[in-house]
Image (spheres, rainbow, N blue to C red):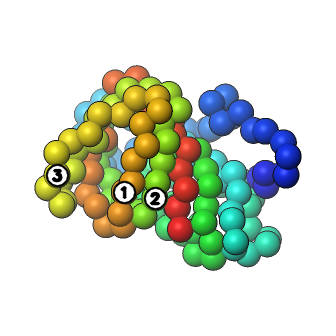
Amino acid sequence: MRLAAATTTDASSLPLPHEPVAPDQVVAGSPTTGHAVLDEIAGDASAGDASVGDASVGEAIAGEAASGRTVGVWEMSVGAMRDVEADEIFVVLAGDATVAFEQPALDPIELRPGSVVRLTAGMQTTWTVRETLRKIYIAP
């Protein structure tokens, strides 16, 4: 997918096919994740194809952001999972969740619509989602 200039994309209703979180990442429940790349900024002009699925958003973002800033939508269903983060900034569109920081050891944060968060590459986190969480992310 490539965002067209002077148009809108409804990120809150964009279909995101989900895949189960890898068993070694599951902490509780049966969470699933889905994501779609909306665009890539200042990168390879041929980039921007939609890329959907993958339990680890960190791995997905890192692979897609090699040549520029990636803009995408990510969603996680109810449950809890561990992840190793990519460098990103995100804005929560919908849902309710807590992110606990295992490494570095930091206070947990609460996520709700409007939350803006900065993660750095390599952070080890646990995401506990109480209501399906959807976010827009920007990653280098």
Name the mark on residue 5: none
Q: Amino acid at mark 1?
A: Leu
Give the Cα separation between the discs numbered 3 and 2. Answer: 17 Å
Q: Position of residue 23 (x, y in %)?
A: 32, 47
The answer to whether 47 is drawn above or below residue 99 in the figure is below
Q: Amino acid at mark 3?
A: Leu
- How many discs mark residues in the rendered view? 3
| Residue 34 in sight here | yes
The answer to whether 125 is drawn above or below residue 128 in the figure is below
Q: Amino acid at mark 2?
A: Glu
Name the mark on residue 88: 2
Q: Residue lying furthest top in this view?
A: 131
- How many residues crowd mark 1 within 10 Å: few (<14), some (14–19), many (20+)? some
Q: Quadrant of residue 67?
A: bottom right
Residue at figure coordinates x 79%, y 55% from the top left: 2
Name the foreground residue: 75 vs 54: 75
Q: Position of residue 96 (x, y in %)?
A: 38, 26
Q: Position of residue 99 (x, y in %)?
A: 28, 41
Name the mark on residue 119: 1
Q: Quadrant of residue 100?
A: top left
What residue does disc 3 label?
Answer: 106
Give the Cα separation between the discs numbered 1 and 3. Answer: 12 Å
Q: Earlier in the sequence, mark 2 or mark 1?
A: 2
Q: What SS does tag 2 mark?
A: strand
- How many residues crowd mark 2 within 10 Å: few (<14), some (14–19), many (20+)? many
Q: What SS does tag 1 mark?
A: strand
Q: What SS does tag 3 mark?
A: strand
Residue at figure coordinates x 66%, y 36% from the top left: 11
Circles 2, 1 touching at the beta carbon (< 8 Å): yes
